[in-house]
């Protein structure tokens, strides 16, 4: 395991062994922890508007709330990961560009670790910019579990065992390993954490990790009514999909014939699904799946359940959403 070879991690474990009573704020004072809010997305689904600047309530944007919750958890040094600093000038925080653009969130993690290693911090808390419900309670629990863990990184996992790999605390000495993983061509955060032996931190309530990845997600968060979209389903799958729609509260309406917003087709071999047709027993690319989910008003976890019910595999997943 790569983690066992990390001198910084071994050093941290030795400190824990010397002071079994050291927990929480005591450990935080000995290991300086900074925070990075990952805001490097282009906001293409919102017409170019940065997701962190969306306002769930008038006058207060998501990013402003996240920064306040981080500060109330005891972390003072906060930066924003973004390649364009202009939208975030009003916050008065350091904006960290990617060391090599175009990598997605893992590029922001690499740049954040590199930045705070130069400032001699011991670890970095990472959070995405699109969590309107995250609070200091979840943040503090992540930090506390990191302080007690032998792992070099921890990440959030909600009560349905859905991983949130971008909600993580990462030891600064993992920088070289993250860089090596990127050099090997890997981009998926969940795969990186698995390779580095990161530990999940369980949370009973999934609500604080609700993300507004799409306009439909944001509309649901604000309580706006979404009209159901239609999905054409083969007769033998109607009852199963109907039960899933009811249990998850999905804004979908099943039709058995005619036109529909999305069609499900029975396939005898593994066929690639596209943005109009899902082929049972086939596969779909992650970006296509995310776009369909956004169009239907379904988050990644719920759409993943729909794909599982249809025996459709996801390929090229970048964020560990499916």
Image: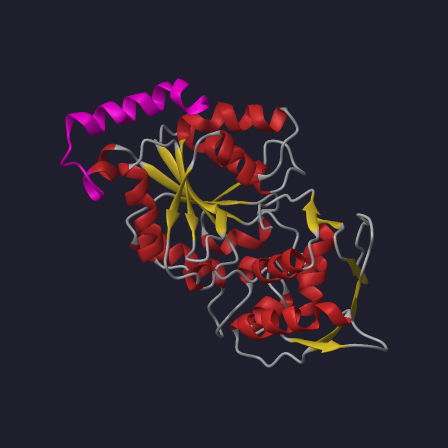
The residue nearer to you, when weighing 21 against 219, is: 21
Residue at the spot 37% in from the left edge and 40% down from the top edge: 34
Quadrant housing residue 247 = bottom right
Quadrant housing residue 43 = bottom right
Quadrant housing residue 155 = top left
Q: Which residues are magenta?
A: 1-26
Report the colour scheme: secondary structure
The residue nearer to you, when weighing 236 against 49, is: 236
- Residue 7 among magenta residues: yes
- Left or right of 74 on screen, residue 289: right
Q: Position of residue 20 (x, y in %)?
A: 15, 33
The residue nearer to you, when weighing 119 against 133, is: 133
Q: Could you tell me if residue 160 is visible in this image? A: yes
The N terminus is located in which quarter?
A: top left
- Left or right of 309 on screen, residue 160: left
Q: How many circles with numbers are drawn on the protein?
A: 0
Residue at the spot 68% in from the left edge and 48% down from the top edge: 314
Magenta stretch, main secondary structure, is helix
Q: Position of residue 179 (x, y in %)?
A: 55, 26
Residue at the spot 48% in from the left edge and 71% down from the top edge: 59
| Vertical arrangement, residue 53 with respect to residue 96, above or below | below
Q: Could you tell me if residue 286 is visible in this image? A: no
Q: Position of residue 2 (x, y in %)?
A: 46, 22
- Residue 16 among magenta residues: yes
Q: Position of residue 303 (x, y in %)?
A: 63, 61
| Vertical arrangement, residue 98 with respect to residue 320, above or below | above
């Amino acid at each position: 395991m790569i983690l066992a070879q990390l001198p910084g991690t071994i050093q941290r474990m030795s400190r824990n062994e010397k002071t079994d009573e050291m927990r929480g704020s005591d450990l935080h004072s000995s290991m300086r922890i900074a925070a990075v809010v990952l805001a490097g997305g282009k906001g293409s689904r919102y017409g170019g508007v940065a997701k962190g600047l969306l306002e769930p309530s008038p006058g207060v944007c998501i990013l402003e709330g996240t920064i306040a919750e981080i500060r109330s958890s005891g972390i003072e040094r906060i930066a924003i990961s973004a390649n364009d600093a202009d939208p975030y000038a009003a916050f008065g925080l350091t904006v960290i560009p990617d060391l090599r653009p175009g990598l997605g969130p893992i590029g922001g993690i690499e740049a954040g670790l590199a930045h705070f290693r130069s400032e001699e911090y011991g670890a970095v808390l990472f959070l995405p910019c699109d969590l309107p419900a995250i609070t200091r309670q979840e943040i503090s629990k992540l930090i506390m579990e990191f302080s007690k863990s032998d792992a070099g990184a921890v990440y959030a996992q909600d009560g349905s065992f859905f991983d949130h790999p971008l909600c993580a605390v990462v030891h600064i000495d993992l920088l070289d390993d993250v860089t090596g993983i990127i050099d090997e061509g890997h981009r998926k955060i969940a795969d990186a954490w698995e390779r580095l032996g990161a530990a999940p931190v369980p949370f009973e309530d999934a609500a604080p990790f609700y993300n507004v990845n799409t306009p439909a997600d944001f509309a649901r968060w604000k309580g706006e009514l979404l009209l159901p979209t239609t999905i054409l389903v083969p007769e033998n799958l109607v009852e199963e999909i109907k039960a899933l729609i009811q249990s998850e509260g999905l804004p979908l309406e099943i039709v058995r014939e005619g036109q529909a917003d999305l069609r499900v087709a029975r396939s005898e071999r593994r066929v690639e699904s596209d943005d109009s047709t899902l082929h049972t027993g086939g596969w779909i690319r992650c970006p296509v799946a995310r776009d369909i989910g956004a169009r239907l008003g379904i988050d990644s976890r719920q759409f993943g359940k729909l794909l599982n019910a249809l025996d459709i595999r996801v390929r090229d997943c970048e964020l560990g959403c499916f």
